[in-house]
Image: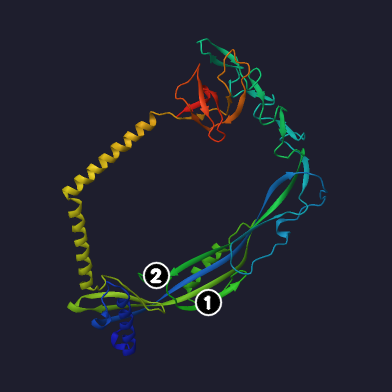
Amino acid sequence: MSVSNLQNDKLDEIKDAINNWGNKGFFRKQNVGNEIQIEDVQSLECFSVKIKTQYEQRTIRSASEPYRGGSISKYHPPNRWQIDVDLPTSFQNLKNSFAVPNSDSVDDCSSCSGRGKTDCSRCHGSGKINCYSCNGTGGVPAQDYHGNQGMVPCGACRGGKRDCSTCYGKKQVTCSACAGCGQLKFYQILDVRFHLKEQLHWINPSDIKSKKLNKVSGEILVNEHRSLIKGFSGVSTEVTDAVKELMVESQHTNHDEERVLFQNLIIERIGIQKITITSSGNSRNDLWIFGNEKEVQFVGSQPLNKLRVSVVLLISLTAILAIIILSTSPNRASNSTGQNTSQNQQKNSNSKVKQSLPKVAVIKTQAADMFSKLPNSNNSTNIKLMELKLGERLELLSPKYFGKGWYHVKHPQTGQEGWINGNQIDVE
């Protein structure tokens, strides 16, 4: 449109929009609208088509639980769409689950064949496991103070075996699938999922990005809320074709499991103006003014506040130069290197000292026994003080062992002192 055909108030609106754009940014040139000459104005229309759809999805899955008695229905279960469910009245995402009526049945548990018990998986149904102290040999090595070596009976077991700690020697455990009931009740669960889908299509003749158009408002031409959008009027053929394509996509569902509950169609028209301007030096530039908010987007370079840009660049360069000078100072670098070297040497020295003084014994087997006295062939009154578990830590009273692999230790919680076999610990 020729500028001569525009009224002065329309030209003032354009300049005010440009001035508002300039006053919003620190680096933008202020009141730039007062310094430009408007050469040409083109009016365009942009349309947004939005369809929001609420879906309901119903799926059936099987479930089971231990059967502890009670009546079982003899009727047939209903179809998934025959079950009453509270439906939403607004767009939302929601999940819920329900037991399907008349879907229960009873059958023997397949894991235990209806017995309610299964063979213990730890001892494989034998009721016995290898002793942790002697590894199933029935004896532990020992050496007396005279240097005589030999084996002594393991004080933690009989013949290298002990009762299984899972089934306590009973060989079987309660079936985990049926909780010992021997039977399971099978039934169906209806999972209901309400979910929404939003579709957006732009008919945009300009270079303005969609994310910017989303931030402005225009004129609402169509706002329909129905169970299914079928038809509408009052828009161009191009817009109508775009709406039909979105409707087909939104209403395509798996009819066995999913259906459309309701839809909302909004068609919005956003006014756009393409402005050609000249500024100082007769340089030409194009810009867009769009939406009720009169947002502005320049096609080429934006007019900037050169003074502010120069000041910021000068401050940034000064800061970078100061950092370079400080980082290359020889005295500062030398002192820093010396301090770091001294600290590293001290850390390495402390680490070596700690590594050379073993003071902790850590149990490395599933279980270990601590005895009151050093085991040997002449000691028949030896008493097992306690059974220790994997990972427990003991205070090592002496870094060297006595006899053949026996260590003198102390329990940190109880304060009891005793002896433990070296095959069952790691020394730190």
Please give the residue where the numbered disc 2 appears in the rendered image.
Answer: 212
In terms of sequence position, does the residue under pointer 2 or pointer 1 come before the other?
Answer: 2
| Secondary structure category for the residue under label 2 | helix
| Figure check: 190 above or below 172 | below
Q: Quadrant of residue 205?
A: bottom left
Where in the figure is residue 242, as x and y percent of width and height? 49, 68
Q: Quadrant of the N terminus?
A: bottom left
Q: Quadrant of the C terminus?
A: top left
Q: Is residue 7 visible?
A: no
Q: Name the residue located 22 percent from the left edge and 78 percent from the top edge.
A: 279
Where in the figure is residue 72, as x and y percent of width and height? 81, 48
Where in the figure is residue 111, as x and y percent of width and height? 71, 35
Q: Nearer the viewer, residue 36 or 411?
A: 411
Residue farthest toward the bottom in the current orientation of the protein: 8
Which amino acid type corresponds to the residue marked 1 in the rendered image? Val
**Disc number at residue 222?**
1
Q: Nearer the viewer, residue 10 or 46?
A: 10
**Disc number at residue 137?**
none
Which amino acid type corresponds to the residue marked 2 in the rendered image? Lys
Q: Quadrant of residue 184?
A: top right
Q: Is residue 105 left or right of residue 201?
A: right
